Image (spheres, rainbow, N blue to C red):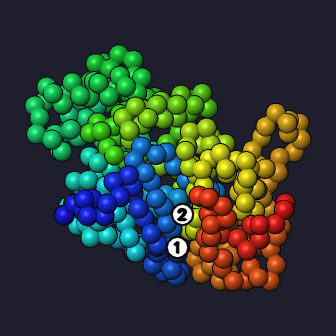
Amino acid sequence: MVKQRELNGQNDLLLDVQGLKTWFYTRDGVVKAVDGVSLQLRRGEILGLVGESGSGKSVTGFSIMGLVGERGKVHADRMMFDGYDLTQASAEQMRSLRGNRLAMIFQDPMMTLNPTLRIDTQMIEAVQAHEKVSRRAARDRSLEVLRMVGIPAPEARLKAYPHHLSGGMRQRIAIAIALLNSPKLIIADEPTTALDVTIQGQILYEVQKLCREMGTALIWITHDLALVSGLADRMAVMYAGHIVESTSTAALIERPMHPYTHGLMASIPSLGTRGQPLFQIPGSTPSLLNLPAGCAFRSRCYRADAQCAHAPSLQAVGEDHLVSCWHSGEQT
Ligand SMILES: Nc1ncnc2c1ncn2[C@@H]1O[C@H](COP(=O)(O)OP(=O)(O)O)[C@@H](O)[C@H]1O
Ligand SMILES: [Mg+2]
């Protein structure tokens, strides 16, 4: 695969995805899980990709990683990562990028870990798959990353099998494996959702710190806007296969423009709302199978009118603030 970084002259841009569509052809019809998503990420930048369950966040991550199964068709107008054109990459080339420059942390650490192998075997293999180094050096590197993610007694952990470890410990090891080869980009797909709240916070903090130290860019996928707003530089809000709003975290928190983002923010508990019933966005996420035309949020939206029968597109509403809503300029 030819590296094109020198040609496009945008050294700062690590990931540039334009018009990503990932559709699943099922017996019941076409599921447009991702339907025209564009994302850009600079080197070392942390992006929070948020939205309710079923909005297409994971499929977006899988599409970038080249992990969409056979039934899914991935199309993008552009998908450049660190100078590589991912739209042209073969399965073999994607495999060599994954676990090396590009890593993913899954919600379930057993997607990364092999239950039948000791941790040391798995980590050493993960290093040696991408680099010609001795077993000894690979083991030393494994110990180093285990320490980096705050694993006590890492020597002992190396000899363990996954089933010897707690859920939080397994996820830390999966994170350590993602970090092994110093990737340029990590896509973390709700990696703390299954864990205790205290462990969630610790892991979030540690991953953020490590990414900052190593200059690794991060896409943190979550349904929890409050959680990721403490971590991300930028946010992208996803709804029914589309990004409906994207801007800096500060702007999103201070001036959310899309009614869906308003709804997500209003449903976050805070000291001010203590004792009061929490706001809930009425209705539920639509099925992405045969989604009707127009704005997908309109059946749940307090601002919807006749215009919303036509699909809005992402428009700039300020510097570095994109919103896909006919009514984004109106006062709440
Ligand atoms: N392999 C698949 N076949 C058919 N539909 C799928 C497949 N994977 C995901 N989907 C559908 O795509 C939509 C988006 O899924 P997903 O990206 O997992 O949502 P999220 O991560 O935001 O919860 C869902 O409606 C889901 O049912
Ligand atoms: Mg998901």
Residue that label 1 marks: 35
Above or below residue 230? Residue 147 is above
Q: Position of residue 187 (x, y in %)?
A: 43, 49
Instruction: For ligand 1, tell me if the residue under mark 2 lies within 8 Å.
Output: yes
Of the image marks 2 and 1, the number of the one nearer the N terminus: 1
Disc 1 secondary structure class: strand
Name the mark nearer the viewer: 2 or 1.
1
Above or below residue 130? Residue 236 is below
Q: CA distance from mark 2 to mark 1?
A: 9 Å
Q: Residue at x 22, y 60 (%)?
A: 3
**Residue 210 in the figure: left or right of residue 140:** right
Q: Nearer the viewer, residue 70 or 38?
A: 38
Q: Residue at x 15, y 27 (%)?
A: 137
Disc 2 secondary structure class: loop
Q: Position of residue 138 (x, y in %)?
A: 18, 31
Give, as a three-letter code, the residue at label 2: Gly
Q: Is residue 45 visible?
A: yes
The reply to whether discs 2 and 1 touch (Cβ–Cβ < 8 Å) is yes
